[in-house]
Image (cartoon, rainbow, N blue to C red):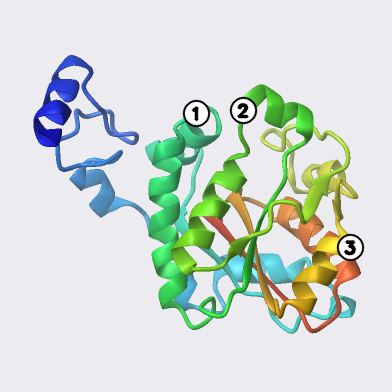
Amino acid sequence: MKTSLSLLADFVLPRRCVVCGRTLLPCERHLCMLCLEDMPRTRFAGVRRNPMAEKFNSGISCEEYEPYACAAALFHYSADSPYSNLTKALKYGGNLSEGRYLALMLAGELKASPLFSDVDAVVPVPLHWLRRWKRGYNQAEVIARVLARGTGVRCESGLLKRCRRTASQTSLDAAGRQDNVRGAFVADRKVIDAMLVSGVRHLLLVDDVFTTGATLLECYRAVRTLAGPGLRISAATLGFAG
């Protein structure tokens, strides 16, 4: 019955591949088989020193306690590529189902990696309350909740807050992005203390796309300011614009 209803729904309102726009087959979800097979996967989850991790660590000073932070993304992101539709559909198109589908793929990679298998908590990059109210959701939190469920850990959405509204990072260069988000995030000391007492030793920061790393680095600093060297902090995103 479910299959018949799905076929009828596809006939009335055909589902289309987020990447190429082709009509999807009943067995396909969000991406056609060809686009899924050709997705430019990074495979960073299994490699400690990868381009994303190198860029992330280059922004961490030696006084910030981290010997080497791990970082991973599901696919290589380019604004000129049709695969950029994967994150745009979630962030601007309200396609939460597609975002969860991709996040589940990333969760599988993280869970299988010894670099991320000991993550204790997942923390999404927060949106300013006004932007979240207008959009209706936080795309980073959509991803983070799936990663938490997929890896069997908790999602700490209340750990970080965006204390001021920032401009969109899209049109800014690297220096502009850093200036735009500098001091934009604060961490809740009570939440961090409770996490540490409960045994959290490895925290995963989550966003939709890693470009220069400015946003994730500011979130890192907000947490690191209150947490000592006993807490490891890693990062994960759907896309990596390297």
Q: Mark 3 points at which residue?
A: 189
Identify the amino acid type marked 2: Gly
> Number of numbered discs present?
3
Left or right side of 52 for 33? left
Distance between the alpha carbons at the discs numbered 1 and 2: 9 Å
Please tell me which residue lies in front, 33 or 163: 163
Please tell me which residue lies in front, 13 or 236: 13
Q: Position of residue 158 (x, y in %)?
A: 75, 52
Identify the amino acid type marked 1: Gly
Q: Where is residue 184 in the image (x, y as percent from the top left)?
A: 86, 46
Q: Position of residue 70 (x, y in %)?
A: 61, 74
Left or right side of 204 for 215? right
Q: Name the residue under label 1.
A: 94
The image quadrant that residue 65 belongs to is: bottom right
Please tell me which residue lies in front, 150 or 224: 150
Say few, some or many: other residues with alpha carbon within 10 Å of mark 2 (under 14 / 14 to 19 / 20 or more): few
Q: SS class of the residue under badge 1? A: loop
Say few, some or many: other residues with alpha carbon within 10 Å of mark 3 (under 14 / 14 to 19 / 20 or more): some
Q: Name the residue under label 2.
A: 136
Distance between the alpha carbons at the discs numbered 3 and 1: 32 Å
Quarter of the figure with the N terminus? top left
Q: SS class of the residue under badge 3? A: helix
Q: Position of residue 13 (x, y in %)?
A: 23, 18
Q: Are marks 1 and 2 in contact (CB under 8 Å)?
A: yes
Quarter of the figure with the C terminus? bottom right
Identify the amino acid type marked 3: Arg
